[in-house]
């Protein structure tokens, strides 16, 4: 039995579009960033021939980040149930809750050509899905019906309706009521309230047909349409995981002009305001601050909140488990590189700074509602900085590079370690727990803002260069 922290936010991210970044050094690089972004959920691509390292998963869980494992299984081969049974059992034992099985079975690309043209597509998909979903339940996991392509070659709402109806007909009502639904809630450069209310508000919309005066499910509010289908077919709402959500750079479904990066940040921040914290009342419009986020063009790191009637949303968000934005990062050779928030060269989209500021704002707001002298989060404690609130005496902060940790840095600090025996790490966030912080090497990899935060936390900050000369900061 592992002790894990529950997610403190419904906001999440899709990690990488592959399964190649699950090393310990990857966790050291990305965990501090995820925490600073205020992330509570993370979609991970899960291979079928090996498990994601337990240390990687436990590192996330202990930090209060719940992984959602997505298995992009093939629909043209027999999946090895026994092999996945072992994986499912291990993942459940480690603390995983949700596994999404398959990906977009309603598009031609997901099937072999011969499989797509055969009749009863939904029935044949369920022949794949049901045994694996039941295996996941037996292991103690909650299976997620795969996210469908909005619209899709086989209209997604029609596919979902047929699948839920068939589960009932096959006597799999318990499975239907025990699973969650996955959804891809991209905005497609449409207003955030596009299609809100589902088919009850837009009754003339039909599969493959959306009149000019009507709206459909192809937008952020796709979950309204899926929930309506669930209520109609099984008589109860289902949990919904938005595994890819929000605006993407270049989304231009309705316009000939690509979505610029500032608008990308504004729209995703408007979504963040809806899902800022688990347990918060989400029935208000966007936030108590007034409305949509505006990133001033002349002040790219500032956020202000301005009323905007066009952005108002009447949310019905109680069954949404998580909202996982697309995409944290990708390699330069990946076709998804344009969507990545973090680029391999160290550059970032504007949404990164906006999310970090928003997360800090929430922490400050939460800190003001609890005891001013003792809080569960030492980083948001107004009295943090006194010696009794510095559990680490001395922290040596090392640089971490795009390719990982440099061996020569470890060689250079050996004499210093032998003399002072500090705690060693790579996280400026963690360093704030220390009474004394020594930064190794140049301070260019530490922002002025981070240095200021270390001082504000009451840390004595100094720097040691590669020649071993100690410099006060």
Image (tube, helix red, strand yellow):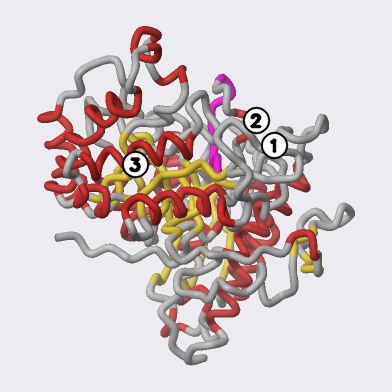
Single out the mark in the foreground, 3 or 1. 3
Residue lying farthest top? 114
Where, by quadrant of the figure, is residue 134 drawn?
Answer: top left
Where, by quadrant of the figure, is residue 227 drawn?
Answer: bottom left
User: Residue visible at 12% across and 36% down?
Assistant: 86
User: Residue visible at 43% across and 49% down?
Assistant: 229
Of labels 3 and 2, earlier in sequence is: 3
Q: Count the numbered circles shown.
A: 3
**With 5 as the anchor, is 322 left or right in this view?**
right
- Badge 1: residue crowd in 10 Å (few <14, some 14–19, many ≥20): many
**With 33 as the anchor, is 62 left or right in this view?**
left
Residue 385 visible in the shown view = no
- Badge 2: residue crowd in 10 Å (few <14, some 14–19, many ≥20): some
**With 406 as the anchor, is 452 left or right in this view?**
right
Of labels 3 and 1, earlier in sequence is: 3
Q: Which sits in the foreground, 3 or 389?
A: 3
Q: In the drawing, what numbered circle is on residue 249?
A: 1
- In the picture of the structure, the residue carrying the numbered disc 2 is 338
- Up-down: is 1 above or below 341? below
Secondary structure, magenta segment, majority class? loop
Question: Which segment did they paint magenta?
Answer: 326-333
Residue 3 x %, y %: 22, 64
Q: CA distance from mark 3 to mark 1?
A: 27 Å
Q: In the drawing, what numbered circle is on residue 145?
A: 3
- Badge 3: residue crowd in 10 Å (few <14, some 14–19, many ≥20): many
Single out the mark in the foreground, 3 or 2. 3
Of labels 1 and 2, earlier in sequence is: 1
User: Residue visible at 39% across and 12% down?
Assistant: 117
Residue 273 x %, y %: 62, 65
Q: Is residue 256 magenta?
A: no
């Amino acid at each position: 039995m592992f002790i894990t922290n529950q997610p403190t936010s419904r906001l999440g991210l899709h990690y990488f579009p592959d399964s190649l970044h699950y090393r310990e050094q990857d966790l050291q690089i990305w965990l501090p960033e995820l925490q600073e972004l205020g992330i509570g959920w993370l979609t991970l691509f899960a291979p079928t021939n090996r498990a994601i390292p337990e240390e990687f998963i436990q590192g996330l869980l202990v930090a209060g980040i719940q992984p959602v494992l997505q298995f992009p299984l093939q629909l043209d081969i027999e999946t090895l149930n026994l092999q996945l049974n072992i994986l499912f059992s291990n993942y459940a034992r480690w603390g995983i809750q949700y596994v999404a099985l398959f990906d977009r079975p309603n598009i031609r690309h997901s099937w072999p050509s011969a499989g797509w043209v055969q009749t009863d597509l939904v029935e044949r998909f369920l022949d794949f899905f049901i045994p694996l979903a039941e295996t996941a339940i037996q292991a103690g996991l909650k299976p997620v019906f795969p996210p469908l392509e909005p619209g899709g070659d086989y209209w997604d709402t029609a596919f979902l309706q047929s699948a839920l109806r068939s589960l009932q007909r096959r006597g799999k009502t318990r499975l239907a009521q025990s699973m969650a639904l996955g959804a891809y809630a991209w905005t497609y450069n449409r207003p955030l309230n596009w299609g809100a209310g589902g088919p009850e508000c837009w009754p003339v919309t039909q599969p493959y047909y959306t009149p000019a005066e009507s709206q459909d499910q192809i937008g952020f509010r796709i979950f309204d349409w899926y929930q309506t289908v669930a209520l109609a077919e099984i008589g109860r709402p289902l949990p919904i995981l938005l595994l890819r959500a929000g605006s993407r750079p270049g989304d231009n479904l309705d316009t000939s002009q690509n979505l610029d990066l500032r608008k990308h940040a504004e729209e995703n921040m408007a979504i963040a305001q809806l899902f800022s914290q688990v347990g918060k009342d989400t029935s208000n419009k966007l936030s108590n601050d007034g409305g949509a986020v505006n990133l001033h063009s002349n002040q790219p790191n500032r956020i202000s909140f301005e009323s905007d009637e066009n952005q108002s949303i009447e949310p019905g968000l109680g069954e949404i488990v998580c909202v996982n934005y697309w995409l944290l990062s990708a390699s330069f050779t990946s076709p998804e590189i344009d969507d990545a928030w973090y680029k391999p060269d160290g550059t970032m989209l504007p949404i990164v700074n906006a999310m970090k500021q928003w997360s800090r704002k929430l922490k400050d707001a939460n800190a003001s509602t609890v005891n001013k002298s003792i809080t569960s989060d030492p980083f948001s404690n107004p009295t943090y900085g006194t010696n009794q609130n510095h559990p680490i005496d001395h922290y040596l902060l090392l640089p971490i590079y795009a390719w990982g940790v440099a061996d020569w840095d470890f060689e250079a600090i050996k004499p210093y370690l032998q003399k002072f025996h500090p705690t060693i790490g790579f996280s400026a966030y963690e360093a704030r727990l220390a009474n004394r912080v020594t930064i190794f090497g140049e301070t260019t990899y530490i922002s002025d803002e981070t240095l200021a935060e270390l001082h504000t936390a009451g840390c004595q900050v100094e720097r040691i260069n590669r020649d071993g000369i100690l410099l006060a900061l």
